[in-house]
Structure formats: C-alpha cells, structure tokens
Amino acid sequence: MFTVAEFTGVVLVASLLAGFVGSLTGLGGGIIVTPVLTIFLGVDIRYAIGASLISVIATSSGAAAAYVRDGYSNIRIGMFLEIATTLGALFGAFLGGQIPTAGLAVIFGLILLQSAWQASRIPKPHTIGSAPDPLAERLRLNSAYEADGKEEHYVVRRVKTGFITMFGAGTLSGLLGIGSGSLKVIAMDQAMGMPFKVSTATSNFMIGVTAAASASIYLSRGYVDPSIVMPVMLGVLCGSMIGAKFLPRLPALVLRRVFAVLVALVGIQMIVNGFGGHV
Amino acid sequence: MTAEAKITDRGIERIVSVILRSGVLLSGTVVFLGGVFFLAKHGGERVDYHSFHPQPVSDRLVHEIIAGAFSRRARSIIQLGVLLLLATPIARVAFSIVGFALERDRLYVVITSLVLAILLCSLIAGAAGAA
C-alpha cells in the first residue's frame, strides 16, 4: 500500500519514461503507460485506460500544434476521416463498458504485440497499386506539401478503404484508451497512398479529436480518477516533449528493435495477466 | 476556395496551432496546481487502486466539476484541467468551421459540423449516462 504522495511520485516517473519511450518509438505514450500502471503498480485497467486517454489528448494536441505549423498535415483529409474515427471512438467506449477487464487486457496485449512488430520493421515505401480515387477529387483531398523548398503534389487513393480502417482505429482508441496512431498511419500511408510525412502529421492531428470523443464518455462513467490522471497526464506530456526535443528523428533500427522486444514482452505479460484474471 | 477568400489554409493552420498549444498549456497548469493542492491536503493518506470504484458524481459531471473547482476542492481543480483539455480539440473543430466558412468551402463546413456534432453528442450521451 502506497501513500498518495508515494503513488504520485512513482506514477509520475513511470509516465515520464512511458512518454519518452513512446515518442522515441513513435508508438505514443498511452500504449505504454497503461501496461506499466496495470502490471507494475497493480492499478485496475479501467483507471489506467481513463488516465491514459487523457494523456493521449495532451500529447497529441501538443505535437499536432508543431506539425500543423510546419504545414505537413492535411486538415481536409484529417477532418473528413475524423467522422470515421470519432464514430469509432464512441463505439469503442461503448464496447469498453461491456467487455470484462480480463478481455480488455488480452486485447491490449495483442495490440502491443502488433505495435512491437510494426516498430521493429523498416518503413516500407508504399506500393501504388491503385488508380487515383475520383472521390478524393470530389472531397478535395488531393494536396501538396513543401519538401526541400519545392512543392510535392500527391493524390489520394482508396478513400473508402481508408475511411473504414479509420473507424477501426477509432474503435481501438476508444476501447483501450490509446491514440492508435500506428493504425491511422497505416490507413493513410498504405491504403490511401499518401506520403509518409503527411500521414504521420495528419494522424497526430486526428488523435486528439478522436480521443476527446471517447474521453467524455469515460469521464462521465467515472473512469477518470483525478489522483491518477494528474501524474499520468503531466508525466507523459513532459516525457514525450523531452523525447521530441532531443530526438527529433526516429532512432536507429537496432534501438527500435530493442524497444520492440520490451514492448512485446509487456504485451505477453498483459495477455498472461488477462487469462490469469490478474487485472 | 475562391480568389477573394479572406483566409487561406495556412492561416487557419496557424490559428489552429495556437489554439492547441494554449489549450494544452492552460490545462497542464490547472492540473498541476490542482495536484499541488491535492498532495498538500491528502499526500499522507493511503491509497489502493487495485479495485475499481467509479468516481463520485462530483468528479464526473461538467457543472459539478466547475462548482467544485470554484469552491477550491483539489480533486475538482484537477478535473477542471481535464475538462479544459477535452475542450481543446472541440474548440479546434469549432474554429475550423469558421475557417472553412471564411474560405467559402461549404462542403467542409458541413463535414466539420458533423464532426463537432459527434463530439457534442458524446458529451451529452456521457452526461446522460452518468446522471
């Protein structure tokens, strides 16, 4: 049993590290802080999800501010796809109230394994196997960004596939209290054939709005405990700011693989805990 | 976008960036101050988060949180910071409607209004569920 002061201190340090590693690996702090709280500090997964969701809004809004200013994010694509992610987030928050905590832990573990696998790979240039989508023209999604002083134009493909994938990303975000940024990037980079930089920036732009949709539900459901949110939000926010400041680019593949192995181990532990009923 | 539009995408993006940054900063400050009050008052108490108990209504409903924060209740001040953070993306979406309207982009006024409606519905649905 901790005192409030001890608990706050321990969670603050853990969240700081989670935010740092999250921004270093590109996975986001939310996906790391929840397993840390549940596995190492024995916090009920519902409290952890509530707190992590709030920290996700903070970090993504902070990061999005910088990305938007740099002009990489496409606000039209972001806004259009937010219809899908916010609806998904509401659905996810609804599901979260129905699924027993053991089930949540197992799903969380599986997502961690998937993220670890994705983080350990070399980002593959997307294959442009489909024609430009006329729907993208109608929705004015095609745009340009500036790279090395010249304008790079891009066209958007498979709008419907992207939209449906975004609903899934929103559902996972609402269910597990994560940003699910990597799935959002997959939808834009792989399915819609957008440039990687634009996908990453636009994904970050969308995470805050998506998380806000489910966070209101979690808040009113009583999952957001101020004494847990306080250190988690401040810790993850500071940790990811430090990560972004000192390491503006993704670190070497070797380092990412080391983190991926750690994330995978945590994922396995979550699944074991879920099946063992220790959540 | 028409030639005589008063504002460009870049202009909108810049304002959006300011909204996001100030929202996070303000909310972080309020949560921090609430946290300091909270620790000063309850720092020595024992806690246990192994079992889940939904938060009391005073920490769940918007008007209760605001009332609590004004009477300087530490937990309510932290929750007020959380509310400010929730309001940040909502404000961003609301502002984007204005921006697209100034650009005379009707399609995106509609799309953005839809997103805002979904966000407001989630607030209302959440409040209805809590009451």
Image: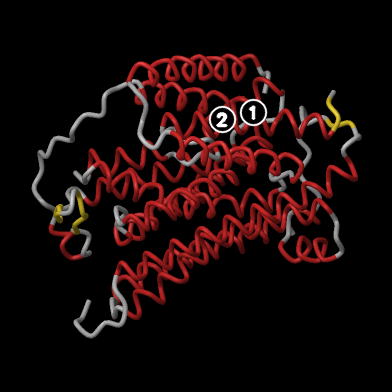
Q: Position of residue A80 (x, y in %)?
A: 33, 59
Tell me if B126 is positioned left or right of A241 in this view: right
Tell me if A84 is positioned left or right of A186 in this view: right
Q: Amino acid at mark 2?
A: Ala
Q: Position of residue B99 (x, y in %)?
A: 37, 74
Q: Taking A252 as reference, is A69 above or below it?
A: below
Marked residue chain, label 2: A
Q: Taking A180 as reference, is B37 above or below it?
A: below
Q: Which residue matches tag 1?
A: A14
The residues bearing labels 1 and 2 have C-alpha atoms spaced at a distance of 6 Å
Q: Taking A90 as reference, is A267 above or below it?
A: above
Local SS, label 1: helix
Q: Residues within 10 Å of mark 1 (few under 14, many from 20)?
A: many
Marked residue chain, label 1: A
| Mark 1 and mark 2 residues within 8 Å of each other at the beta carbon | yes
Q: How many marks?
A: 2
Q: Amino acid at mark 1?
A: Ala
Q: Position of residue A115 (x, y in %)?
A: 41, 27
Q: Which residue matches tag 2?
A: A18
Q: Position of residue A132 (x, y in %)?
A: 11, 51
The quarter of the picture where the N terminus of chain A appears is: top right
Q: Taking B107 as reference, is A64 above or below it?
A: above
- Please tell me which residue lies in front, A98 or A79: A79
Local SS, label 2: helix
Please name the residue shown 21% across and 29% down the image: A124
